[in-house]
Amino acid sequence: MRIRRQNVVIFLLVGTLFFAGCVASPRYISRKAVKGSEGEFTFKEQVGLASYYADEFHGHPTASGEIFDMNGLTAAHRTLPLGTRIRVTNLENGKEVIVTVNDRGPYVKGRILDLSKGAAEKIDMLTSGTAIVRIELVK
């Protein structure tokens, strides 16, 4: 009888954890797209959570082949073409920085952008480590 109770308790715990993992976490991601000349949709604006990366990757090659400089003004984005220049605005304080996408990422779920430490410093997000930002293409 004792083994059955333990099995029931374990089953309930596992089930609770499973369903808790299925609950969608709040996301701040929104995208605006416009129709391009060929009829395809192109990136115009994106809002979501950004973070920054620094020491561990400093001096290593990025996806573009250039060496990562944590003090530079660069970013990692999952889909924007490498070399794209974007304006990143910290929506919590209104500060902005223009960066070049030279890497892929972020690889943390729920984030839309990884900034270099230098770029994160310009928009005052070093203390918190993350910020809600708006990304816009620079023409």
Image: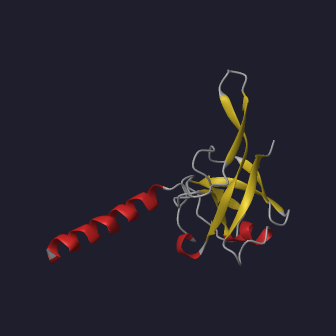
**Residue lying at 78% horizontally and 72% vertically, measured from the top left:** 124
Residue, far right? 94
Q: Nearer the viewer, residue 68 or 55?
A: 55
- Residue depicted at x 15% and y 74%: 3
Question: Which residue appears at 54% of the width and 70% of the height?
Answer: 57
Question: Seen from this angle, which residue lies furthest front?
Answer: 1
Residue extending farthest to the top is 38
Give the percent coordinates (x, y) of residue 88. 76, 56
Q: State the image coordinates of residue 18 (x, y, percent, origin top left).
A: 38, 60
Q: Quadrant of residue 11?
A: bottom left
Q: Relative to 38, is 61 on the left or the right? A: left
Q: Quadrant of the N terminus?
A: bottom left
**How has the structure been colored for display?**
secondary structure
Q: How many marks?
A: 0
State whether residue 130 is above or below residue 82.
below
Q: Is residue 128 above or below residue 30?
A: below
Which of the 4 image quadrants contains residue 63?
A: bottom right
Pick the residue in front: 14 or 89. 14
Q: Name the image quarter holding the C terminus.
A: top right
* Quadrant of the image occupied by residue 94: bottom right
Residue 110 position within the rendered picture, expressed as x and y whole percent measured from the top left: 57, 57
The foreground one among 10 and 88 is 10
Instruction: Give how far across and how far down residue 7 sits, in percent.
Output: 21, 69
Is 133 on the left-hand or right-hand side of 11? right
